[in-house]
Image (cartoon, rainbow, N blue to C red):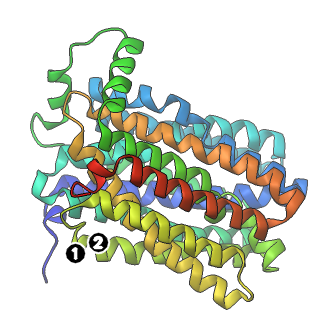
């Protein structure tokens, strides 16, 4: 049986398992707590606000990127995942003791969000440390599969345990997944010297001065700037419709329960998993920047079909296609950033990439307000129209970098 080159490396196999376990815990936790907030408060605005607070840590993401340059991505990931274990243990104890309420969930969810938002960027940096350049595209695609597999199995597992046994036992499972993820992260050993290749090229100064240098570098590099702006855009317009508002869509648009919510979440993830698999086989071609732009447009069009579907069957098909196409946008985007950024600035640029996720809490909060006033179909259609228009504007403004022949 042919094994992809990245999986022949023991360190990458440990990272794969660590990322998979951590992602499963993320998905279970998001679904469980999102449903808890919706049922306890009966407010779509508070649901959207809770999702937004979990992305609050994007404001700290550049500091995480700088930290990865100084202590190494593996070491930083281990510290982050230790925090996940501690916070999940706290929620588990409160849930088993019957002391959990929406205010506590908001507070701990916010603390979790301060750290969790930077996890994907640190994973990508670690993949870059583990893999030679010729295997980077395949490795990124396989790494992305961990999130897609987790969103499928984690969502269904979390929904099933929550529905059958309640929030306390569900959180026991969340804690176990986080603990396994931490243990496997500690077993990852980067290529000799690779983890600190960036730090040897950086003259350490003040943290804010170093961050400013990274911002100036990204701003002055057209392809990086285009990728970062597109990352902000899809988080603002696309991910709210397939993430933070999914509980509301499941219950109020399609009339589903917790298991139905898990099915919708898993559908999007299965589409993403298929997209990651295809991309790992085919690659991003000669121009990954062009692919990420085209995929962003198609992604928004699929989401229009999802929020305006006349039946659940059509909605599920549209959601699966949206999941498939999103990885043809997000994986080439990571590849573009890792290839374009120099060793000296790569950690800080990836931190800025995660800062772009701040579009998600902004988009979620605004969507919560608009949905309460105009309804979800109209709000979703507006978001997708804005997404397509701004993607086209980005492609035109930086056409020399994205489409060199135009």
Q: Position of residue 14 (x, y in %)?
A: 27, 55
Q: Is residue 101 left or right of residue 305?
A: right
Instruction: Determine the CA span between mark 2 and mark 1.
Output: 5 Å
Q: Position of residue 84 (x, y in %)?
A: 53, 42
Front residue of 346/213: it is 213
Front residue of 85/50: it is 50
- Residue 279: assigned label: 2
Front residue of 215/146: it is 215
Q: Is residue 197 above or below residue 302?
A: above
| Residue position marked by numbered label 1 in the rendering | 282
Seen at 16% across and 51% down, the residue is 131
Is the N terminus in the top left, top right, bottom left or bottom right quadrant?
Answer: bottom left
Residue 188 in sight in this render: no
Disc 1: CA contacts within 10 A as few (<14), some (14-19) or many (>=20): few
Q: Is disc 2 placed on a helix, strand or loop?
A: helix
Seen at 55% across and 67% down, the residue is 300
Is the C terminus in the top left, top right, bottom left or bottom right quadrant?
Answer: bottom left
Q: Position of residue 402 (x, y in %)?
A: 30, 53
Q: Position of residue 3 (x, y in %)?
A: 15, 74
Q: Is residue 92 above or below residue 267?
A: above
Q: Which image quadrant for residue 37? A: bottom right
């Amino acid at each position: 049986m042919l094994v992809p080159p990245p999986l022949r490396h023991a360190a990458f196999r440990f990272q794969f398992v660590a990322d998979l376990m951590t992602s499963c815990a993320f998905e279970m936790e998001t679904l469980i707590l999102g449903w808890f907030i919706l049922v306890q408060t009966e407010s779509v605005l508070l649901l959207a606000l809770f999702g937004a607070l979990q992305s609050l840590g994007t404001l700290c993401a550049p500091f995480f990127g700088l930290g990865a340059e100084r202590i190494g991505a593996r070491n930083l990931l281990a510290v982050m995942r230790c925090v996940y274990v501690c916070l999940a243990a706290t929620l588990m104890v409160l849930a088993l003791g019957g002391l959990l309420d929406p205010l506590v969930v908001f507070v701990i969810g916010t603390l979790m969000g301060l750290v969790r938002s930077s996890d994907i960027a640190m994973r990508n940096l670690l993949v870059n440390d583990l893999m030679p350049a010729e295997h980077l595209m395949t490795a990124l695609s396989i790494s992305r599969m961990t999130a897609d597999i987790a969103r499928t199995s984690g969502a269904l597992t979390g929904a099933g345990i929550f529905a059958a046994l309640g929030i306390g036992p569900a959180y026991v499972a969340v804690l176990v997944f986080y603990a396994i993820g931490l243990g496997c992260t500690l077993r990852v050993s980067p290529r000799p010297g690779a983890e600190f290749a960036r730090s040897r090229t950086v003259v350490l100064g003040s943290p804010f001065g170093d961050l400013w240098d990274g911002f100036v570098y990204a701003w002055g590099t057209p392809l990086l700037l285009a990728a970062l702006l597109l990352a902000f855009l899809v988080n603002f317009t696309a991910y709210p419709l397939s993430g933070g508002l999914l509980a509301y869509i499941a219950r109020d648009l399609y009339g589903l329960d917790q298991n139905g919510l898990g099915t919708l979440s898993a559908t999007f993830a299965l589409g993403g998993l298929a997209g990651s698999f295809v991309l790992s086989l085919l690659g991003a071609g000669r121009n990954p920047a062009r692919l990420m732009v085209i995929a962003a447009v198609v992604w928004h069009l699929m989401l229009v079909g999802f929020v305006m579907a006349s039946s659940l069957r059509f909605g599920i098909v549209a959601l699966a296609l949206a999941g498939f196409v999103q990885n043809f946008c997000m994986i080439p985007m990571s590849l573009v950033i890792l290839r374009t950024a120099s060793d000296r600035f790569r950690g800080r640029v990836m931190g800025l990439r995660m800062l772009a996720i701040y579009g998600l809490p902004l988009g979620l909060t605004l969507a919560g307000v608009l949905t309460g006033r105009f309804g979800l179909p109209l709000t979703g259609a507006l978001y997708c129209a804005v997404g397509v228009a701004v993607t086209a504007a980005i492609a035109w403004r930086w056409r020399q970098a994205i489409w060199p022949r135009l």
